[in-house]
Amino acid sequence: MKKIINKFLFNLLIIINLISCSSDDKQENLVYKIAGTKIFYNGEAKQYIGSNAFHSFGVGSNDMNAWKIDVVREFIGNVQQNPISGNPIQDQNGAYLHSLQAIVENNRANNKVTILCAFGWNGTNETLFTGKRPTNTLWWNDYKIKLKEWAIQFKNQPDVWLEVWNEPYRYDRADGYTDAIWENDMNQLVSIIRNENNTNIIVVPCAEQGQDESVLINKGAVFLNGKSNILFDVHAYEKWLLDSNNSIENRLQLLKNNNLPVLFVEIAPMNAGVLMNPQQMLNKLHEKGYSICAWVWKYDETDTDALLTSTGQPNDTNNNNWGSSYKTICLKTRKP
């Protein structure tokens, strides 16, 4: 009897150990993995350089190949109605929306990572996900249901990174913002995805409509505790581009010193009616190995932030040579 009991206990310990190892190895076996400040793909450190795009209105990223773009942040402006899979639909505003799955598959066919970002609830300016506290929006509970559906759909597609919100909270904190509010709101959104056993990279925006990284310095380490595959998102507009070179260097170094995984998913020459020159910032980000997405892949020389003209050339029209500058960055050797 004693031998039987000992054998049973021995086998039980093996099973417990296997379960534990399976849990511990789950992060190790991911195709895309965040470790420290770096993004890894199949164990190799990577720097991704790409663009924001509007492929929900028309699938197709093969035109990005000439620029060697390897990540596309997709503008999903009507989360409520945008189909997750299946055929395109016409939404309440008259726009035709292609499914998220179709967007992802086209990007994948062109060897590009997809970041699906919730930019708006119903396709109107009033419900854009910018300058708002998520939990105070009328669609908060409905949005959480949609985010859960995204998590379920893409949980076995590791080249799809889910960004939980575009630009939360007012730029001037006049909405009563505190870092504790950010921590609570972002924890809720991350939990929705992880509760569906989705281990994909999750992109989490910072404060002041994405431009203020101080919340990451104050709360980032605590937020990351017990979590895996989290990337923080910073937007580099006037709060960065109008800062001094020394200050920008110090801010970037502070992010590194705090071991915070960050990518800059929006940068452009025009914001809030101010024309800026992103060139030096782009050079710093590239040299320091940060991943970057420009705003925006669009064929329209009348839009200062558009990367292309209507004929497909780099758009350098009254925008500090934005198109050519960013194309040069895209074509550079990655420095992860």
Image: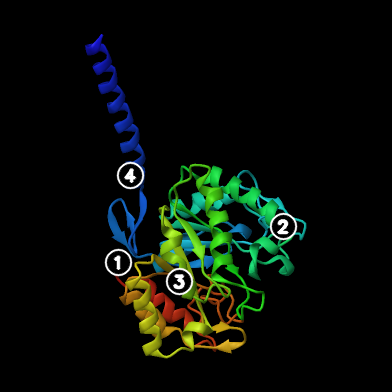
C-beta proximity under 8 Å, tags 1 and 4? no
Name the image quarter holding residue 180.
bottom right
Q: Position of residue 179 (x, y in %)?
A: 54, 70
Residue toward you, 11 or 198: 11
How dense is the environment of label 4, judged by Cα within 10 Å: few (below 14), some, or many (20 and up)? few
* On screen, residue 86 above or below 219: above
The amino acid type, in three-letter code, at marker 1 is Pro
Residue at 67%, 67% (x, y): give it. 128
Distance from disc 2 to disc 3, alpha carbons, whole Å, reads 29 Å
Residue toward you, 100 or 180: 180
Residue at 33%, 42% (x, y): give it. 24
Closer to the chain start, of discs 1 and 3, is: 3
Residue corresponding to mark 4: 29
Closer to the chain start, of discs 4 and 3, is: 4
Residue at 45%, 50% (x, y): give it. 200
Camera-nearest label, 1 or 3:
3
Closer to the chain start, of discs 4 and 2, is: 4
Residue corresponding to mark 3: 218
